[in-house]
Image (cartoon, grey):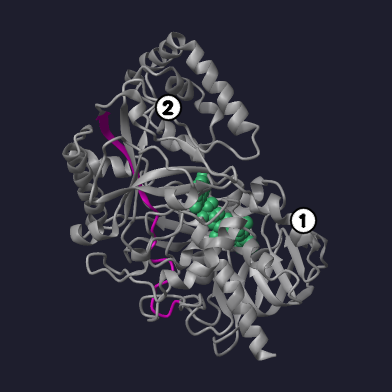
Amino acid sequence: MMFDANELTAGDSLEAELCIVGAGAAGISIALKLADTGRNVLLLESGGMEPEKATQDLYGGTVTDERLHSPPDRYRQRRFGGTTTIWGGRCMPFDAIDFERREFMPHSGWPIGRDAIDPYYPEANRLCEAGDFAYTAEEAFDRPLLPMIDGFESPNFSTNQLERFSCPTDFGARYQHRLRAAKNIRVLLHANVTKLQLSEAGTRVESATVKTLTGRHFAVRASQFVLATGGLEVARLLLASRDIQSNGIGNRHDVVGRYYMCHLAGTVGALSVTGPLGSVHNGYDISDEGVYCRRRIALRQTAQKSLGVGNFIARLHHPRITEPAHRNAILSLLFLAKFLIPYEYGKRLHGEEKASAAAWLKHIRNVAAGPFDAAAFGWHMLKDRKFAERKFPSIIIKSKANLFSLDFHAEQQPNPQSRITLTQALDPLGLPRLNVDWRYTAVDVDTVTRSIALLSQDIERSRIGTFDYDPQTLEFEMTRYGAYGGHHLGTARMGTDERSSVVDGDCRVHGVDNLFIAGSAVFPTSSQANPTLTVVALALRLAAHLHAQRQRQR
Ligand SMILES: Cc1cc2nc3c(=O)[nH]c(=O)nc-3n(C[C@H](O)[C@H](O)[C@H](O)COP(=O)(O)OP(=O)(O)OC[C@H]3O[C@@H](n4cnc5c(N)ncnc54)[C@H](O)[C@@H]3O)c2cc1C
């Protein structure tokens, strides 16, 4: 059943066995897992079925350094389906090494290993509609794929790992019918949780305070609560619930909001492959189930350990589109079409600096010089992306000169100084707005610098061509567009010691018996991997845990 908080009578109180706050990837996955189990589940969602400006504005806040991080109402969506309404759909699991405590990665180490999540990855993959849980070329394809780059052999980097792409599935649109049909699930829209009320002893959540933007307010009582409001909003709600614990819930040791990570990403250098044009295969392969898959250059776990750096991957990429010197009609068309591309995608494509009139003219000339290429690309984008149910995931340009740049995505070190805090400013519901102070460290610069140096060396050694880049510019490139948007990690991290973590290995807030966190807030480290597949797998694991716990109590 789905209903609207604006239809409730003011002062009403709702009861449930399990109350989930937030209907994004995490919250919806938990509800689906518990559908038809007979448990009385209430899913509270701030937004409605469509974007609404006033609701989205509740995400507004400040950032300490605007060059390093986007405003907090960007790169997340406050509506049913959450940020999956705009995500890119790139899926891959975390690697085993990501869970390990590594001497060279300060504050690393999960209290669980990958084996604890493995049983849930295949189901998570299905919910993300990314096909089989098969993440190497050999597992996913029963035919051998052509090498990514003919002749590239490296003891340090693999080229057979895959990223697989979701449709990208909007969890709200895709699963609303299943949620409506489940007899034991009620979804309440326009229900903003503004506070969790603890018992006097501070060991249980008694109720959640819910408000609507139309002025209604009521309490929800439940035996168990799950916060699934996304990596930034989890910290905000814990910090703002301070009636009983003056620092906020789970925050006796001032850990909530700290260790905030995104990923390090950038596009660098010029890889010139000397072989013939057909010697590079850097595009998508389509699996038997019709899923777009793409290989990546991944720093092996042994190499991470011997170099003493974080996890790192790179993809072959097109030249930067803002620079008309690429003389590519398609890239220039993308530049000229910048007004059609949403902020979240345009930021890295176009940058934020203003292009000169001369640069605009050069882009127009590039398009005019290759009208057929530009028209064919426009048609491909309409047919295979805009109007396709399963969208072509990204821009792949066949280089006519075997010339590429490297697009990297790397692990960020967990750092207690990188943090989310509350400000004095209040939103219209009376909740303090947040401030984001994202920081990076020398370890982060080292991960990127040393991985790229090793890759460059291995490219030369295997005699496939040359990779030219300026090591001095790497720090600038990895922060050119600031923190990688949309991956908000680590603000309520998992661990065994409450002096350095917020939740335990079951995602339960230390010291609070019935409060659990779902989502990337609990990640103690970030991996190289995009987070959502692991968010969903952890959510399914949490659902199984909550169900088993309830069964035992009966
Ligand atoms: C442009 C973009 C591209 C991305 N691409 C990828 C990708 O390719 N691969 C990948 O793995 N990840 C990607 N991501 C990240 C992905 O979207 C998130 O990891 C995922 O949505 C997180 O799920 P979640 O349920 O934790 O949070 P969300 O999806 O953000 O859901 C949180 C929900 O909580 C609700 N909520 C918030 N506060 C309250 C409150 N107080 N009361 C009630 N409800 C509340 C919100 O309305 C929302 O519905 C991308 C993100 C962006 C922005």
Instruction: Check disc 1 and give the amino acid type.
Output: His
Please say if 392 is above or below 547: above
Residue 414 falls in which quadrant of the image? bottom left
**Residue 179 relative to residue 119: left or right:** right
Residue appearing at x 39%, y 35% in the figure: 282
Q: Which residue is mark 1?
A: 177
Badge 1 element: helix
Residue 408 is situated, as x and y percent measured from the top left of the image, at 34, 44
Residue 39 is situated, as x and y percent measured from the top left of the image, at 73, 77
Residue 9 is situated, as x and y percent measured from the top left of the image, at 83, 67
Please say if 291 is above or below 187: above
Q: Which mark is residue 397?
A: 2
Question: Magenta span has 476?
Answer: no
Distance in Å between CA atoms under marks 1 and 2? 38 Å
Q: Which residues are magenta?
A: 251-272
Q: Nearer the viewer, residue 459 or 362?
A: 459
Please say if 298 is above or below 367: below
Residue 321 falls in which quadrant of the image? top left
